[in-house]
Amino acid sequence: MRSPRFPVRGAVTAAALVLFGLAGPGTPAHAAEEVNVYSYREPGLIDPIFKRFTDETGIKVNVVYSKDGLIERMSAEGRNSPADLLITPESGLLIQAEAAGVTQAIQSKVLEDAIDEKLRDPNGHWFGLTRRARVVYASKERVAQDAITYEELADPKWKGKICIRSGQHTYNIALIASMIAHDGEEKAEKWLIGLRDNLARKPAGGDREGVRDVKAGLCDLAIGNTYYMAAMLKNPEQKPWADAVKILFPNAADRGTHVNISGAAVAAHAPHRDNAVKLLEFMVSPEAQALYAEGNGEYPVTTTAKTSDLVASWGALKPDAIPLSQIATLRKKASELVDKVRFDAGPSS
Ligand code: FE
């Protein structure tokens, strides 16, 4: 039923262009230029960037926002999908999109020069656009030390003192995958059991609820992404949670802190492929990078863009050198490990 739509739509577009031609002077030459974005990220964050893109290029950005189901929608739409660019708040969805066959490889010197190769797909199917670190939020009152390692989280000295969200959450899966990459599966499993037995409660809630529970005295350490500090500081109810903790960057003195990305991928059947690449390239310009990163309290993915004063105030970030493409290949193993040690059942399960 869908396949005959293309020639018909093509004919309509041709007719529309003829009409545009007849419209005479005053009609901008680029009036027909557009790009269609499917975004898992919220409008408030990306609309200001799209507006600047349109101001600079004349290319109209049409956006479909949804918290879920966009990859499934692209799969279902198949060749007739209007999607040009998929924007996601984290890397798991980019991996999922590539696996579902709804992305295409892009070669762009602008993107390759701007984005560290560890933070994009080696084949060009997805690109990181902002960075965040997975850090330890430590009680200012009860934790004296100012440095920590992920390995140390399994040390019995922290028994009953750590809060974390579900082990199966994509943020923790990526972190556990990075532990497997560094230490091997056997050591990573022992570590995960040690961490599980140090938990103050069953894994639950989000990263911010961990910090809330530190403030409440239920735990001393909570694992969370850096941008949640910015989010909590902006929220009157959550600001006291943020004020109760300091950020420790794990493994800052050795291999570096686990970093993940938000990102984007060009759609497999993008009808406006060139405009999608133009938008993606615009999003790594210093101006767009600063705007995008600051909007969510993240780090720019490029080194030329300015990190906001707030984010910079948390201290120096030394990122783990393991490529995200390698972490992607270990996600399944990490997920199996979480089930195997019954991580989500909580301590001593
Ligand atoms: Fe998040």
Image (cartoon, rainbow, N blue to C red):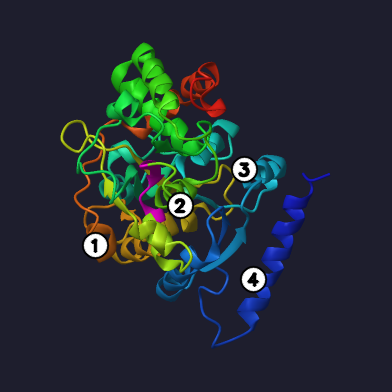
In this view, the residue in front, 299 or 248, is 248
The kind of residue tagged 2 is Arg
Quarter of the rendering containing residue 10: bottom right
- Where does the image place residue 45, in percent across and percent down from the top left? 47, 64
Residue at mark 3: 71
At numbered mark 4, what does the secondary structure look like: helix, strand or loop?
helix
Q: Amino acid at mark 1?
A: Lys
Judge depth for marks 1 and 3 and give the one in front: 1
Q: Is residue 102 left or right of residue 51?
A: right
Compared to 29, does 313 lie above or below? above
Would you name the residue on which mark 1 appears?
Answer: 306
Q: Residues within 10 Å of mark 3 (few under 14, many from 20)?
A: many
Residue 26 percent coordinates (x, y): 54, 88
Residue 278 or residue 316, whichever sits in front: 316
Q: Earlier in the sequence, mark 3 or mark 2?
A: 3
Secondary structure under tag 3 reads helix
State which tag comes first along the sequence, 1 or 2.
2
- Badge nearest the viewer, 4 or 1: 1
Quadrant placement of the N terminus: top right
Q: Nearer the viewer, mark 2 or mark 4?
A: 2
Tell me which corner region of the image, top left, top right, bottom left or bottom right, holds residue 107: top left
- Residue 69 rendering spot, x and y as whole percentages: 66, 46
Image mark for residue 212: 2
The label nearer to you, 4 versus 3, is 3
Q: Nearer the viewer, residue 8 or 267?
A: 267
Label 2: how many Cα within 10 Å (few below 14, some 14–19, many 20+): many
Q: Is residue 249 visible?
A: yes
> Magenta residues?
220-228
